[in-house]
Every structure is written in C-alpha cells, then in structure tokens.
Image (cartoon, grey):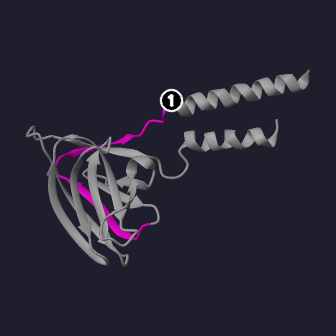
Amino acid sequence: MEVGFIAPLFVLFLLVSGVGASPFLVKFIDTGNDNRVTFQVVLGNTDNQTYWTGIMSADHSETKWEASVSANSLSSLNSTVEPGIYDIFVAWDNDGNGEPDTYVWTSEGGAGYSISNDGQQLFISWSGLNFSQYQISFTDKFAISPVPLPGVVWLLGSGLLGVGIIKKKLGRN
C-alpha cells in the first residue's frame, strides 16, 4: 500500500474513533411536567477578556439562553428553558467591537465534559479557554447526545477503502 493512501485512512480512523473532544449536544429533560427545565450555571473566567456563553437550538436558529462572563470573575446564574436538545457555546470578541464574533460549540468538538455522580451536574471543559469552572446544575434531568457522524464520512471512507482495494489488486497483476 502506498503512503499517499494511508494518510486519508488514518484521518478517517481518527474521525471515527473520536480521538480528542467528541462533539455532543445536551438534552434538557422536563421531570416536573411543567414544560420547563430549571438549571444553574456557575462560570469561573480566569482570562483577561469577557466571554459570552449560551444555549441554542441544535440547528443554531434560536438562542434559548445567553450571558456574558466578565474578565477574571466568578458568576452564578439561574435560568429555565423549554425541554429539548441544545448546543452550548462560548464566544468572545476578536475584532474589538464589544460583540461576540468567534464561537466554540459543544456540537463541533470544542469541549469535553464530565457528569457528577448524582447525575445532576454537567461540567464542561472548553479547549484552549481559561475557564476555571463551567458547571451546569440541573433541578430537572439532562442527557448527553453524541453528534452522529454525517453519512458523507461513511461514504467517503467506503470509497477510499474501495479505491485502495482496487489499487492493491491491480498492482498484483
């Protein structure tokens, strides 16, 4: 097998195996049958800039909750949203106009997570950002929903595998 063929297979393997932070969405579950999910967000920003964080619909069409986190601060915020599957983000101002313009999403693999033993707290660790704490405590329940790999990745992988097999068979003749 040629080296030029091995590199794309290795990249495909890394995509499929989930090396690094795996993309995820968070499902907010209403356990009180009141059509709302109550939660508290505790944010510890140890950086010298303001960050914005929020919860958006999975397709990013609607902001459900948003807050700013001042430089070098610790904030605790209570809120409610409707039950649903959401994408969580952190954003910051790169061009100096005082508005967020650069975003990192949990659905794009920009974060990792852990869950407390009682299943009521979600801890998110953001890649390359200086949060000493990013914790969501739920009064209701939540679940993590892995973001599925698009069908294109599987189709591309099958095509590359097929080309490699054909190349190998033709090389023997």
Q: Quadrant of the N terminus?
A: top right
Question: Residue drawn 41% across and 40% down?
Answer: 147
Q: Is residue 126 left or right of residue 12?
A: left
Q: Position of residue 4 (x, y in %)?
A: 77, 42
Residue 136, placed above or below residue 160? below
At 68% from the left edge and 31% from the top edge, which residue is drawn? 160
Could you tell me which residue is drawn at 36 percent across and 66 percent down? 92
**Residue 2 colored magenta?**
no
Q: Position of residue 23 (x, y in %)?
A: 43, 46
Q: Which residues are magenta?
A: 129-151
Q: Where residue 127 sits in the image (x, y, percent)?
A: 46, 61
Q: Quadrant of the C terminus?
A: top right
Count of numbered circles on the image? 1
Mark yes or no: residue 153 visible.
yes
Assign the magenta stretch its main secondary structure.
Answer: strand
Position of 168 with respect to 46 (left or right) is right
Q: Is residue 141 magenta?
A: yes
Does residue 17 lie above or below 161 as drawn? below
Q: Label 1 sits on what residue type? A: Gly
| Residue pointed to by mark 1 | 151
| Residue lying farthest to the top in this orientation | 173
Residue 119 visible to an observer of this rendering: no
The image quadrant that residue 143 belongs to is top left
Q: Compared with residue 40, is residue 34 higher up or lower down, i.e. above or below?
A: above
For residue 83, side relative to residue 49 (left or right):
left
What is the residue that sits farthest to the left in this orientation? Answer: 34
Mark 1 is surrounded, within 10 Å at the Cα level, by few (under 14), some (14 to 19) or many (20 or more) other residues, namely few
Image location (x, y in percent) of residue 71? 31, 77
Q: Name the residue located 50 percent from the left edge and 29 percent from the top edge.
A: 151
In front here: 21 or 159? 159
**In this picture, residue 141 sits left or right of residue 166:** left
Assign a secondary structure to mark 1. helix
